[in-house]
Amino acid sequence: MLGAGEVTLRRTGGGWREAEVSNQSTGYCPDPDSWPAVAAALDRAGVVRPEGFTHAPVFRRCERCRENNVVREGVFVCVFCDADLPAAWNLRPSPS
Ligand SMILES: [Zn+2]
């Protein structure tokens, strides 16, 4: 499985170099754990890549109000309703 997100490629003298990799995605919010899948895909494509996501926000869905949160500074509290957020990643692609 390939992690959803954004990869920005920048052309350099030697070929493509990836300028930025992020797991931020509007439709699907993967955990930073999806990095190995992204890295493997980039390696197959021959892209020089960093050692990890350049931005790796942690997403959690509030189980009380169902809003998606970006966890800031390790504080697992919903910014919308102050409920505790689960420790484990709990987002799934929403059916469309
Ligand atoms: Zn909430």
Image (cartoon, rainbow, N blue to C red):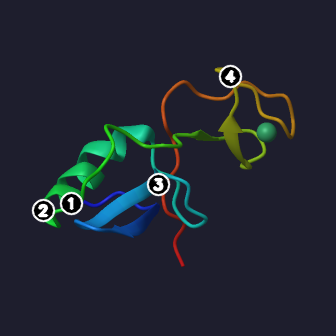
Structural distance between the alpha carbons of marks 3 and 4: 21 Å
Q: Earlier in the sequence, mark 1 or mark 3?
A: 3
Q: In percent of the image, x 70 and y 21: which residue is there?
A: 75
Give the Cα separation between the discs numbered 2 and 1: 5 Å
- Can you say whether 56 is above or below 16 in the image? above
The one nearer the camera, 68 or 24, is 24
Single out the mark in the foreground, 3 or 4. Answer: 3
- Which residue is labeled 2 in the image? 44
Q: Residue at x 66, y 29 (%)?
A: 85
Using the image, tell me which numbered label, if any, was put on residue 20.
Answer: 3
Residue holding disc 1: 41
* Residue 15 circle label: none
SS type, badge 2: helix
Residue at image x 83%, y 36%? Answer: 79
- Using a 10 Å C-alpha cutoff, classify the residue at mark 1 as few (fewer than 14 neighbours), some (14 to 19) or many (20 or more): some
Name the residue located 31 percent from the left edge and 37 percent from the top edge.
51
User: Is 54 left, or right, of 49 in this rendering?
Assistant: right
Residues marked 1 and 4 touching at CB (< 8 Å): no
Q: Is residue 85 visible?
A: yes
User: In this figure, which residue is indicated by the disc labeled 4?
Assistant: 73
For disc 1, does the CB lie below 8 Å from ligand 1? no
Which label's residue is closer to the chain start, 1 or 4?
Answer: 1
> Which element carries disc 4, helix, strand or loop?
loop
What amino acid is at disc 3?
Glu
Closer mark to the observer between disc 4 and disc 2: 2
Q: Position of residue 81 (x, y in %)?
A: 87, 36
Quadrant including the C terminus: bottom right
Q: Nearer the viewer, residue 17 or 82?
A: 17
Looking at this view, name the residue that lies furthest to the top. 74
Residue 46: image quadrant is: bottom left
